[in-house]
Amino acid sequence: MIPAIRACNVSLAYSDGDVTNYAVRDVSLEIPERGFFGIMGPSGSGKSSLLYLLSGLKQATAGEVIFRNRRYHPMSEREITQLRRECFGFVFQQPFLLNYLTALENVLAAAPPGDSSASERAQELLETLHIVHLRDKYPYHLSGGERQRVCVARAMINRPQIIFADEPTAALDHKNGHTVIDLLSSYRERGAVIVVTHDPEMLTGADRIFLMRDGELESVIEPAPQTSAV
Amino acid sequence: MRQIKHPLSPWLYFRRNPGRTLPVLFVIVVAVALVTSIATIVNSIDQTVMTMYGYQKYFMVVTPRGALTVSDTTKQAIESNSLTGEVYATRPAFTTVRTVFGRFPTVVFGLSNEGQRRVMERCGLEMVSGRMPASGAPEVALSVEMARNKKLKLGDPVLTPEIEDSFSPIPARLVGTFQGPVWLALTSEAFIEENFPVAPQGYIVMSREVAQQQSLDSSLEKAIPEIDARTWTYAKLVRDTRDALTNLYLIMSLVIGIIVFAIAFLIGMLSNIYFMQRLPEFATLAAIGYQRRGLLMRALGETALLCAIGWLLGSLLTVVLLVGIREIIMEPRGLILNPFDLYAYRFTFPFPIAISAFALFAIWRHLRRLDPVSIIERRQ
């Protein structure tokens, strides 16, 4: 498969006086155009930092990240932001929904203004994620799992090429966690889904798992192919 | 399916966040009402002067200097001017009218019956009650607004020996009221001549056409030697009034400037606090691909909308307040106040600009340094 995104010897270092600490060190990897991928490792292993580097939320201090032949390094902040808007979707550990917007409006908030089909897509997404009955509810009326599903819908509204999910199930119970992962996994046919987690159970069915330890890529696991769960 | 407007519109934010928007709105409304009211009241001095002495738009007055009658040279200058239409001899008595800033002196023109009739015609005044003063009689006719201002009804003394600023050795009573675009007080010249031995005789000079009055004023101002006579014209009235009010307007502008700065600073601080509370929201939007400039414009849009609504409501409140004040307090006392004085509203224009600038600065400071990851990673 053609890689959608490539990291070539990327590092993310923080200087603390004379000492340099590496959140990510010399990591190289490739993410294909489609599939469900996991970044796993213990706390502080640099898995979230790697996700931020791949998604352009952080700039690498060494090495380079390339998305479809576009190198992040010479791109301006404006261009990278635009890239995130047009090509990526995000799910964070906390949903960070806008409290004064309904579920449907929160999904639409990620759509570009003037996108006439966005309402329809948002509605369809809420149906697919089984929360269409909550479309007019405000976030404070939703459970944690429901909020995270709204967040997944928000990540999908622009039909992104890659969805980045940073510990999307960490704040959820087991059942809701699986539901969210299943929903994310269902997107693998349309694009790449990269999930950061410390829970191996959540990556059952992943096409590839990157194991991180102490900021370095320890190994890459490619489980045996299986039929998509959703 | 129903199309939904983009949910990040300022209007939606305004409607759904009353806890944040209403306090700011309240401050803006009160500030606009306060400033407009101050400016309207201060500006009422100018309006009062222009109404009280507005008759000078229709004729000029020439009074002698250092003598009781106008010199021949001055007479010659008046009569020889091609724009001069009618000239009437006049002698003055004085009274006062109340304004919000104290009593203002005004002239009671002593004129012949013909002079009175022509002056009224010229000024567009019409009798509403009583009659004009008879020749030689201690009688006065006033604009109805002046009568109301002085709380006078027909038969009441206008000029009396007891009141220093409305002095007359013989009480002169109100015999008629008239109404029109300007205020005027008229009496008989013969009565003044007989009872005010030192009242100088001047002239009321009218141009052939009303439209020519300003040209005639200007021409006679140049032609009449200053040492001989003093000319009273509308242009001079406007000039003198504005000169006299310059310092007052300066002080008012200073006070308003301080209010604008204080309010803008306060709202800037509030914007700062509100923005801090909304950091996760802005960080999330930045993370999912909103440009900083776009976020800044969004915040600016919200502030601008708040200012616009605040300004409109503030203006509306001012009009309601001032109309109430005019109806209940001012008009019954014959005081002038224009609640629709557009000039006063100009002083409120700095509000939206200053508030937006302060809020923009406060928000930009945070947005410039905003690192979405640092907010997202807090994971609270």
Image (cartoon, grey):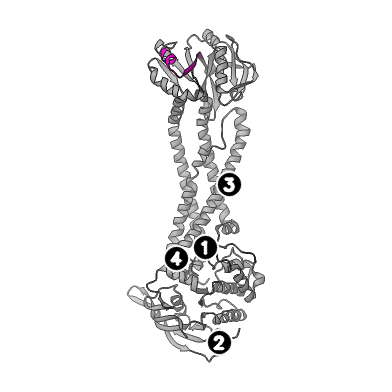
Residue A17 occupies which quadrant of the picture?
bottom left
Residue B3 shown in magenta: no
In this rendering, the answer to whether A63 lies above or below B126 is below
**Number of the front mark, 4 or 3:** 3
The quarter of the image holding the N terminus of chain B is bottom right
Callouts 4 and 1 on one subunit: yes
Q: Residues within 10 Å of mark 1 (few under 14, many from 20)?
A: few
**CA separation, marks 2 and 4?**
37 Å
On the picture, is B36 further left or further right than A22? right
Residue B161 in view here: no
Chain letter for the residue marked with disc 3 in the picture? B
Q: Position of residue B65 (x, y in %)?
A: 41, 14
Residue bearing the label numbered 4: B370
Secondary structure beneath dot 4 equals: loop
Amino acid at dot 2:
Gly
* Residue that carries the numbered disc 3 in the rendered image: B313
Measured in 3D between alpha carbons, the distance from the residue under mark 1 to the one under mark 3, in whole angstroms, is 26 Å
| Badge 4 or badge 3: first in the primary sequence | 3
The residue closer to the viewer here, B234 or B42, is B234
Q: CA distance from mark 2 to mark 1?
A: 38 Å
Q: Of circles 2 and 1, which is in front?
A: 2
Which disc is residue A102 wearing? none
What is the secondary structure assignment of the residue under circle 1? loop
Q: CA distance from mark 4 to mark 3?
A: 35 Å
Q: Which disc, if any, is residue A205?
A: 2
Residue type at the position of mark 1: Arg
The answer for which chain carries disc 2 is A
Span shown in magenta: B76-91
Residue plotted at (65% across, 72% down): A132
Q: Which residue occupies the foreground of this view, A147 or A78? A: A78
